[in-house]
Each structure stands twice: as C-alpha cells, then as structure tokens.
Amino acid sequence: MKTPKTQRPAKSKDRRALRIAHIHWAFPPVIGGVETHLTILLPELVRNGHQVFLLTGAERDLPERVDYQGVAVQRTPYMSLDYLMQHDAELLREEIGQTFQDFLERNRPDVVHAHNLHYFTFVHAQLLADLCHARGVPLILTAHNAWDDILFLQLSRDIPWDHIIAVSHFIKRELTGVGCEEKKITVIHHGIDLEFFHPGVNPHPLLQRFPELKNKRIIFHPARLGLAKGSDVVIKAFRLIHERFRDAMLVLAGAKNIVDWGHTQNKDISYILNLIKYFGLKKNILIDSFRIEEMPQLYAACQVAVYPSTASEPFGLTLLEAIGMARPMVVSNMGGMPEVIRDGICGYVIPGRDHESLAGRLNQILSDDALRERLGSTGRSVAVDHFSKELMCRNHIQVYSGLLTGGKST
C-alpha cells in the first residue's frame, strides 16, 4: 500500500508566503469530518510554502503545543466543547478573549480561518471577529454544517465574516436562505490524498486481522454509528440482501472518540446493536473502530460502500475515499452528497430512509461485476478531476489572496 509522503519541498507559486491561522473546536485524536479535513488541508498549505497555525480544544494527556506535519497546533480548554458544555461561555468571556488575543499576537497571521464557529456559542465568534477587525486581519468562516435554529441564523448572518467558504452548494443555499450575502460565499469541495486512497491497495493485512471477512461480499458503511448516518437503514437493507447473498458481510466503522455535543451517540448505538440482534445478524455484521492506515484496506476489501444518511449530510469525505479507491457508492439524496455521487455514473442516489431501494441497488451492484467495475473506474476519474487535495488547497489560497489584495488575483 502506498503511504502519503510526510515531507515535500515547498512548491508554492504564490507571490508571497502567508501566515494562516485556523481555529476549530477539535482535532485528532478526536475524529469527525471537519477534523479529518483539517489533517488534509493544513499540511498541504504547509507543503505549498505557507506557515500554518491551529488553535483547537484541549484533550486529556496531550501537550498544549505540538507540531503536526509542520502545522503549529495549540490546544486550550476554552475551545473544548466538552469543557464548554460544563461551563457558561458568557462567564468565560475574559478568558476566551485573552486566549484568542494571545494566539493572534504570538502568530501574527495574515488571515484567520475559523471552522464551524457559526455554532455552539456566540461568545467565541463575536470575540474573534472583534479582535480580527481591530487588527485589520480578514476573518474567514468555513461552514461545514447547517442547523435549523436561531443560533445558526444569528452567527451565520450577524457576525461580520469577511468571507464564507461553504463545503457544498447545499450549504451555500442554506446560508443564503438565512440572509448571508451570496457574493461573500465561495463553494470549495473537500479533497483527499489520492496517493493514499488509490486502486490496487492490498487488503491482506486487514483480512488477516479479520479472517471472517475472507471470501465474502463486503458492504462497507464508513460512518460513525448513528441514526443520522443511516446505520439503521443499512441494517434493514442488509437483512434483505442477506436473504439473497448468504456470503454477504456488512462492516460498520464505529468511532471511539468523536464530538458528541448532544450526547445522542450511546442511545443510537444501543438501538443499532439491538436491531442487529433482533434480526439475527450478529455473525454477519462486523463493528469495529479502524485506524486511518486501515481505511484504504477496508475499501479495497469491499465490493461497494454505502452512506444512506437520514439527515442533510453537508458533504461526506468518505464518499471521496470510496470513489478514490474505485469503489461504487450508494448514498441518499440528502444534503451535498449528490454533488459527489452522480447517479448511475459512480454509484447511485436513493431516497432518504428507503431501505428497500438501498437493498435493490446493492443487490444490483453485488450481482454484476461489469457494472461494479464501470462505476468504480468512473468514480476514480471523478475523484482525480475534481476532488484532489491539491485542487482544494489551490482554491483556498485563491480565497486568501483575493481578500488580501482586495479581490485582485495574485
């Protein structure tokens, strides 16, 4: 298996190297879509010759400051959602403001780029905006999600973001729907390392670890266990699939360390495990947590991947991983996922919460080798043309440069 290169010579063609500060609530070992995105984007910015700093939440037993592939990471409890759930952010206004001020003074960024700071607390967004504008530093928001409540409306519209990056056209529509200026919003799709997720990976090490997967028709659901991710829909569909393909196995990728703001994860897991037991499928469904190094092996071992979210998925990085590995994917028509998976081209798009449609499409893919090969090959081409980390990085630099030059290209 090819592994991503950790060091590359700077290859930036920009006229000047930038100092870029990123701010987000969490970073690995916490696992989630935004956190994974940051592990891809930030080192790529460094490889392009820029200096990158990240302020994120504190984690137990981890140092306050660490270098991550050239990115200077600083952790603080005042960005930790677990800590903030137990304290009133308004009462911590002085501490939060001082933390932001020290971070900006120490790193002297040319631009500040916040991720999902349009939610959870008003205090953080307001303080950061005040400090950035007092220094004349452009403040960018990436909206990775949208929520249906007043806090989302207020923080998206009323905080004076200099520019907003939306991770999909779906998220852009949500933002303009609450009154954000369309001209201040740029859609930048995520990108992945296509040298890491590529066809031809040998799944043998994974099959040695999980011998029950050998010689099976494997369906892979690369999402944390949860009803919003459609885990129950997959299991209901798999019950029908297993009636036809007795050698089928379903792999559910659980996660041990995630952001669980609403404390719904344990309740969801309990229901999912009971559903599996009720259907008598315990021997046919594998649930485990997997290291990032094992993910390409999982895609290589499976025949098809699936992501039937019941909530409006903003984008879905795992969709890129699947098509990058030349694996077809079946998704629901929720949120931004149809912007990646083109129906009949690199997979299929089904109605939300329709386990029968899901089972039908999966049966079709499992029973037709030529169809599976065509969908996978086309998917790889789509990933290379539209969803590389290099393209994603260039698009971000273009936004930064545009703000710093008053809209003039550099």
Image (cartoon, rainbow, N blue to C red):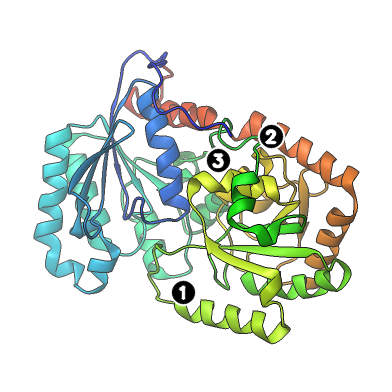
Residue 79 percent location from the top left of the image: 24, 57
Q: Amino acid at mark 2?
A: Gly
Residue 408 percent location from the top left of the image: 41, 20
Indicate the secondary structure of the residue bearing disc 3. loop
In this figure, which residue is indicated by the disc labeled 1? 265
- Quadrant housing residue 61: bottom left
Q: Earlier in the sequence, mark 3 or mark 2?
A: 3
Q: Are marks 3 and 2 in contact (CB under 8 Å)?
A: no
Q: Amino acid at mark 1?
A: Gln
Residue 184 percent location from the top left of the image: 44, 40
Indicate the secondary structure of the residue bearing disc 1. helix
In this figure, which residue is indicated by the disc labeled 2? 200
Q: What residue is at 12 percent from the left and 37 percent from the top?
A: 105
Q: Which numbered dot is residue 189?
A: 3
Please state if 59 lies on the left or on the right of 227 as rendered: left
Mark 2 vs mark 1: in front: 2
Please state if 275 lies on the left or on the right of 217 as rendered: left
- Quadrant housing residue 400: top left
